[in-house]
Image (tube, rainbow, N blue to C red):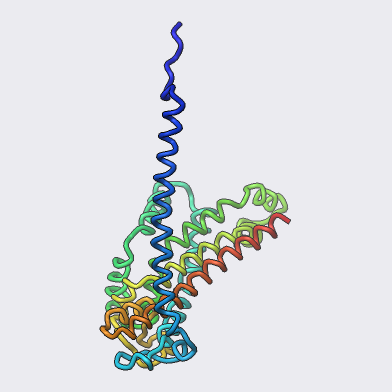
Amino acid sequence: MDAPKARFNPRPEMRRLIGGLFLAIFILCVLVGVVGLLTLLAQVLIEGIPSLNWNFLTTKSTSRFPEQSGILSAMVGTAWVMFWTALFTVPIGVGAAVYLEEYAPKNKLTSFIEINIANLAGVPSIVYGLLGLAVFVNSLALGRSILAAGLTLSLLVLPIVILASREAIRSVPWSHREAAYGLGATQWEVVRSVVLPSAVPGIATGVILALSRAIGEAAPIVVIAAVVFITFVPLTPVDRFTVLPVQIFNWITLPQPEFQSLAAAGIIVLLVMLLSMNSLAVYIRNRFQKRSEE
């Protein structure tokens, strides 16, 4: 019986050379991305730090005088939009995840729903902006308001929250449910007292990461808000508004070099908010993970 033929090149020197070549290519690819990111961050910091001061954070925007222009209106608008986005997204997303994982029967209808939720997570954000313009702004007559933007961004991040929550619920060991059922608990009591407390770290992490994506979206907000500058701080859900990405974009389009520095300072503020939210997600996950291990 003949010996099986070797699948690889029998020359070890050639194999090591090819392996080292591919390793060098992969490292080069990583370095290109890292160097490009560091270059952009360095440029933003150099241009933005001189304009980043207390007056910049507490002053409203203006299109004529860069030295008197600030980011207060955009920050308040961003906070309002994120509040309404979270208010609509969290209960609906978590509720849908609980239903699909704990209550829904496994049939063609639920499979169809699951496939569409996964597909909706990959839809371009501008499509949600056009949908929000047609439904919330025009059909429901909400106008170009904070509430319309919050509902639009809720549609954008809702699939992400559902998928993350489902994964968190699915990760709860089935033995925990069986132990609760053995003690006479109903299905809702099991979900409320066993499943959801154990799934909180994953759910919270998914929600925060979804909101951090929503806070950086500019395309749907441009469609909904259509505001270049506002000279007031929005105080109610029906007020017109602007958000940080839109404000940064508007400053970049202005010809004066002072506005370019303001745009860089706005990018720094936005990056700080995004990194803070991501750090909060990591902290919550690690804290609850340590508690569950104890």
Q: Quadrant of the C terminus?
A: bottom right
Q: Residue 5 or 23: which is nearer the viewer?
A: 23
Q: Quadrant of the N terminus?
A: top left
Residue at the spot 42% in from the left edge and 44% down from the top edge: 24
Looking at this view, name the residue that lies furthest to the top.
1
Which quadrant would residue 50 be assigned to in this image? bottom left
Q: Residue at x 33, y 84 (%)?
A: 259
Q: Nearer the viewer, residue 260 or 89?
A: 260
Between 36 and 77, the one nearer to me in the picture: 36
Q: Residue at x 37, y 70 (%)?
A: 217
Q: Residue 23: x percent and y percent? A: 44, 42
Point out residue 106 in the picture as x, y percentages from the top left corner: 47, 47
Is 64 rendered above or below residue 75? below
Question: Residue 130 occupies which quadrant of the picture?
Answer: bottom left
Rendering coords of residue 273 (x, y %) = 49, 74
Res 135 quadrant in image: bottom left
Estimate the x, y position of residue 235 in percent, counting from the top left: 44, 90
Side of 24 relative to 130 (left or right)? right
Front residue of 266/255: it is 255
Circle count: 0
